[in-house]
Image: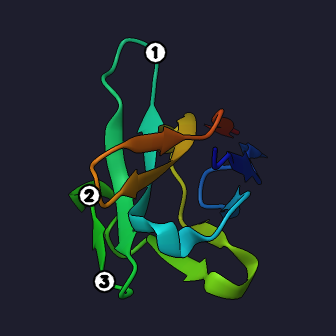
Amino acid sequence: QVQLVESGGGLVQPGGSLRLSCAASGSIFSFAAMGWYRQSPGIQRELVAVITGGGNTNYTDSVKGRFTISRDNAKNTVYLQMNSLSPEDTAVYYCNGKRFTGRDYWGQGTQVTVSS
């Protein structure tokens, strides 16, 4: 059973940056794609960014140009670099791994709060 563990969340001022990390207990090559989702109270969980095994990436419109997803296959880790953060980015961020079978794996989430 692969486990995904997020880290790197916290409190940051508007305009600041954070880098989230998602460490997998096994090889991330076992996933067709890995991504970051976020969820705010009362709002449905949304996809923020995704990266495939081949390195293709996709982002939700609201974070394009500000967030960058990347992967380090040697470390079995996926990152989300978040720049120019705004209060609207405040949410719990979840790491997701999707198997080729379609099965999803989730991390426990890490809180990101953007506030002055």
* Residue type, mark 1 in image: Pro
Quickly name the residue at label 1.
Answer: 41
* Left or right placement of residue 83 versus residue 116 in this view: left
- Residue drawn at point x = 54 percent, y = 56 percent: 85
User: Residue 88: horizontal and vertical position, in percent?
Assistant: 44, 39
Quarter occupied by residue 99: bottom left
Q: Earlier in the sequence, mark 1 or mark 2?
A: 1
- Foreground: 11 or 5? 5
* Disc 2 crowd, CA 10 A, few/some/many (<14, 14-19, 20+): few
Give the distance between the C-alpha atoms of the residues marked 3 and 2, in whole angstroms: 14 Å
The Cα atoms of the two marked residues, 1 and 2, are separated by 19 Å
Taking the spot 53% from the left edge, 79% from the top edge, the residue there is 70
Q: Circle 1: is it few (<14), some (14-19), or many (20+) Cα within 10 Å?
A: few
Q: Which mark is residue 60?
A: 2
Cα distance between the residues tagged 1 and 3: 30 Å
Question: Is disc 1 in contact with disc 2, using a CB cutoff of under 8 Å?
Answer: no
The image shows residue 14 at horizontal and vertical percentages of 61, 51
Left/right of residue 7 with respect to residue 22 in the rendered view: right
Residue occupied by mark 3: 56
Amino acid, disc 3: Asn
Give the residue displayed 35% in from the left and 43% down from the top. Answer: 103
Relative to 109, say whether 32 is above or below.
below
Which coloring applies here? rainbow
Q: For the view shown, which residue lies furthest in the top direction?
A: 42
Spot occupied by residue 36 in the image (x, y as percentages of width and height): 46, 53
Q: Position of residue 74 (x, y in %)?
A: 71, 86
Q: Amino acid at mark 2?
A: Thr
Residue 113 to residue 63: above or below: above
Of labels 3 and 2, the one closer to you = 3
Q: In which image quadrant can residue 107 be found?
A: top right
Is disc 3 placed on a helix, strand or loop?
loop
